[in-house]
């Protein structure tokens, strides 16, 4: 891929920059501006070179949300004029990857830059259509994502500890399968663990579970797979730590327990590369203790550490630990797909 430093003359050029400003908003205010901040080096570089920057982003799923709260947030960081187009998903041609729409969009720019790693798994017009009509380059954040995430599957350091949490079992099962081969240890927590514990025959009570029929026998036999030995459950109005064998039918698993945290601490200490995606508990319901404790430990370890996934990145921002890790990814689904496949539609479009 060509990067923006290779553009010979930017003075007076109109540069269409695809960013991912799909950020959490409440009461018309941005709650977490992590993704916005990560695009600033690209925007400021282009402006310094004399380009007119036109930003393209979506917000929400259906295109109904206004970009005004994002524009207000952006004003805190950008002093020069920049154009932020309204929600690109307001146009049906975007998600349909309509080439006519992409062609019309291309008319307002001279150069295209993709700095939206978090959207690059989508084959949408502003991601894969625009590069067909304009000279196209990778922004700094997209390059950083590729460079750092590829460390996990291209000649990774060992011991490699792969930690997976969260709830999206269907998107994470291919990762578990792939990294049981590549990593030294694969620890699974969060709602993902409930699926595997249930498949092993344990009672998981009313815990969140995906009832799709996955063939998990080979995964469960693998000695690299590590599951929680104990869990924190909600029993009535109480939070109780108990061995996994003791969970009752009316209880909900909210977090991993003390013994499981201790086991993971030992693995963190001996690992040279740690990748972590997704929380290990439902922290909004009181199941965040283990995730917070282990994030502090990983951030202070000597290992290279790569963190990603929307929920856990929000937690990292709140805990002000962002700069303590080797790399914090802006991607959620895009990161999972990149780690599984080694490329994305948005990356291929720039090649």
Image (cartoon, grey):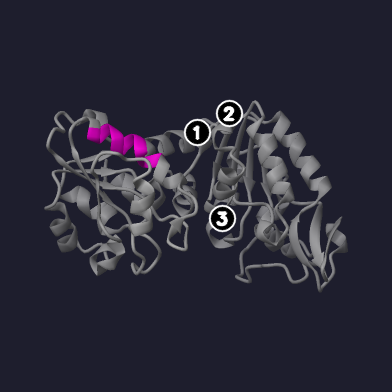
Q: Is residue 298 above or below residue 340?
A: above
Look at mark 2 in the image and give the residue it sits on. Answer: 157
Q: Main secondary structure of the magenta part?
A: helix
Distance from Cα at disc 2 to Cα at disc 3? 22 Å
* Label pair 2/1, CB-CB below 8 angstroms: yes
Residue 66 found in image quarter:
bottom left
The residue under label 3 is 172
Instruction: Choose top left, top right, bottom left or bottom right for residue 52.
Output: top left
Give percent across and percent down for residue 112. Answer: 21, 44
The local secondary structure at tag 3 comes to: helix
Quarter of the image where the N terminus is located: top left
Q: Quadrant of the C terminus?
A: top left
**Which is more N-terminal, label 3 or label 2?**
2
**Is residue 105 shown to the viewer in this render?**
yes
Q: Nearer the viewer, residue 112 or 226?
A: 112
The mark found on residue 239 in the picture is none
From mark 2 to mark 1, how far is it between C-alphas? 8 Å
Residue 339: image location, x then y, percent? 49, 45
Which residue is identified by label 1?
151
Query: Element under label 1?
Result: helix
Residue extending furthest toward the top: 302
Q: Residue at x 33, y 67 (%)?
A: 63
Q: Earlier in the sequence, mark 3 or mark 1?
A: 1
For marks 2 and 1 on the same chain, the one whose residue lies earlier in the sequence: 1
Mark 1 Cα-neighbour bin, 10 Å: few <14, some 14–19, many ≥20: some
* Disc 2 secondary structure class: loop
Is residue 42 toward the left or the right of residue 108 in the image?
right
Magenta-highlighted residues: 38-47
Q: Examine the rendered structure and indicate whether residue 12 appears above or below residue 277.
A: above
């Amino acid at each position: 891929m060509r990067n923006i430093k290779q553009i010979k003359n930017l003075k007076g050029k109109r540069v269409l920059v695809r960013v991912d400003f799909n950020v959490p908003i409440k009461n018309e205010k941005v709650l977490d501006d992590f993704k916005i901040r990560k695009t600033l080096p690209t925007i400021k570089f282009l402006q310094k070179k004399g380009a007119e920057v036109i930003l393209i982003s979506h917000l929400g799923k259906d295109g109904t949300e206004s970009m005004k709260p994002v524009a207000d947030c952006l004003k805190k960081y950008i002093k020069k004029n920049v154009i932020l187009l309204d929600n690109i998903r307001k146009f049906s041609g975007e998600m349909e990857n309509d080439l006519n729409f992409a062609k019309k969009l291309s008319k307002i720019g001279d150069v295209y830059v993709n700095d939206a790693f978090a959207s690059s798994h989508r084959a949408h017009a502003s991601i894969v259509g625009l590069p067909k009509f304009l000279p196209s380059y990778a922004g700094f954040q997209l390059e950083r994502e590729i460079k750092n995430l590829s460390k996990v599957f291209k000649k990774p350091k060992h011991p490699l500890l792969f930690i997976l949490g969260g709830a999206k079992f269907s998107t994470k099962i291919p990762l578990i399968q792939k990294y049981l081969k590549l990593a030294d240890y694969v620890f699974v927590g969060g709602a993902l663990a409930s699926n595997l514990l249930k498949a092993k025959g344990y009672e998981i009570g009313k815990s969140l579970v995906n009832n799709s029929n996955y063939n998990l026998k080979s995964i469960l036999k693998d000695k690299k797979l590590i599951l929680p030995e104990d869990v924190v459950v909600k029993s009535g109005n109480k939070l109780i730590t108990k061995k996994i064998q003791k969970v009752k039918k009316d209880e909900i698993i909210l977090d991993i327990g003390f013994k499981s945290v201790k086991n993971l601490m030992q693995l963190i200490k001996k690992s040279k590369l740690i990748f972590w995606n997704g929380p290990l508990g439902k922290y909004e319901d009181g199941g965040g203790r283990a995730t917070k404790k282990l994030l502090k430990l990983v951030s202070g370890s000597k290992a290279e550490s790569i963190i990603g996934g929307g929920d856990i990145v929000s937690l990292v921002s709140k805990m002000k630990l962002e700069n303590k890790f080797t790399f914090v990814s802006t991607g959620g689904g895009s990161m999972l797909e990149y780690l599984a496949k080694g490329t994305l539609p948005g990356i291929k479009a720039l090649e």
